[in-house]
Amino acid sequence: MRQTWRWFGPDDKVTLSDIRQAGAAGIVTALHHIPTGLPWPPAEIIQRQRDIECLPDGSATGLAWEVVESLPVSEDIKTQTADWRADLDAYRTSLENLAAAGIRTVCYNFMPVLDWTRTDLAHTVAHGGTAMRFDLIDFAAFDLFILARGGAAEDFPEAVHEAAEARVSRMEDRDKAKLAGNIVAGLPGAAEHWTLDGIKDQLQAYSGIREDRLRQHHFDFLEAVAPTCERVGIRMCCHPDDPPFPLLGLPRVMSTESDYDRLFAAIDHPSVGMTLCTGSLGARPDNDCAAMVRRFGPKIHFLHLRNVTREAETVPCSFFEDEHLGGQTNMVKVVHAVLEEERRRKTEGRADHDIPMRPDHGQDILDDRHRVAQPGYPAIGRLKGLAELRGVMAGLTFAATSKGQLDGAA
Ligand SMILES: [Mn+2]
């Protein structure tokens, strides 16, 4: 696996020097400052490559921009409204400009309105550090009583509704504002500019779009960009919904194995693949991540490895982001399946046999709690996750050799 690291650009509190010390070999980033729907200009791409490759004193970092995460798909493309065809042109231009700069792996998602959703960004876990958490009762309290969305009552079982009502009755105004702030942190762009009315307007844009139509719009988007990808050698990889179940009455179409099956049945194209994120997929008990690696192996262009602990075996459910080798996804099985896929690709002679992977999120531990980086992206928590994953890889690789027998195991 190619060990990569997400960096949010020159303002990221986790520096390139930190990333090198963590042992990562490549950078995952985006031009976050360019509004969705506008093309990424060549000069901006090249500037960001320079930011990554050289420190201000001119010394080389040894790092390069290897994966784009994300090149966002506009709401107009997802809903096929307004000037969505102009947005498609801009998307294709960005892909061409990235390929011209040598960057050929592009991650995106197809979630309406929200990029990710948690109710608590700093939930204290057993060891005293903090993790991001999704609490279904808190989320229902927000949806039913703070946002007060029409139709929300039909989306929750009676018991969840009652628990949410009891909880919101004990909340002060500042608790409600904090909960809303945590939830809107997952809105793309400048979350501080969002209002409850603004969210309702965004939801309204999907009032006539159910699951089947959104799925078709996703396929239409890929059909429109796939020829460009093929021509310039780009690998597109769709990140799963986070969390992988519908929220706020919005349809979700990339949450399960069957969703990816339908995508690849509709568009069987080498440049159309997946970002396999064990953290997002793992929030459903019916997603078996190791089985999905084996099933979709040749289509996996990018990997996010992290773990969650579900607090119920229902969909939806509450969950928190556990340690990389904790949680309910068997990470050793996942890494084993990835190593087998990489070996298979090597035998086939595929140039992309080294699959880019990043430790996706980490808990805030030790000095992370003073640094206050992006939610989910601390330095030390991710370093710990990457180091543990690297240990699993080394152990499995050693065990696969003839010297790998433990004493007395024969
Ligand atoms: Mn992910």
Image: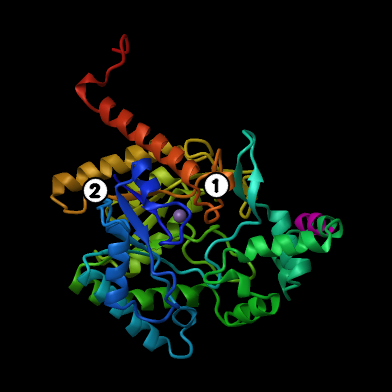
Asked whether 379 or 402 is in front, the reply is: 379
389, above or below 26, in the image: above
Q: Position of residue 209 (x, y in %)?
A: 55, 79
The quarter of the rendered structure image containing the N terminus is top left
Q: Which residues are magenta?
A: 159-165
Q: Nearer the viewer, residue 377 or 143?
A: 377
Amino acid type of the residue tagged 2 in the rendering = Asp
Q: Quadrant of residue 224?
A: bottom left
Label 2 environment density (alpha carbons within 10 Å; few <14, some 14–19, many ≥20): some
Please name the residue that numbered disc 1 is placed on.
Answer: 285
Residue 29 colored in magenta in the image: no
Q: Secondary structure at mark 1?
A: loop
Residue type (three-letter) at the residue carrying disc 1: Pro
**Quarter containing ligand 1?**
bottom left
Residue 163 belongs to the span the image colors magenta? yes
Q: Nearer the viewer, mark 1 or mark 2?
A: 2
**Marks 1/2: CA distance?**
29 Å
Q: Residue 155 appears in which quarter of the rendering?
A: bottom right
In terms of secondary structure, what is the magenta stretch mainly?
Answer: helix
- Judge left or right: residue 184 versus residue 299: right
State the mark number for residue 354: 2
Query: Does residue 328 appear to the left or right of 136 in the view shown?
Result: left
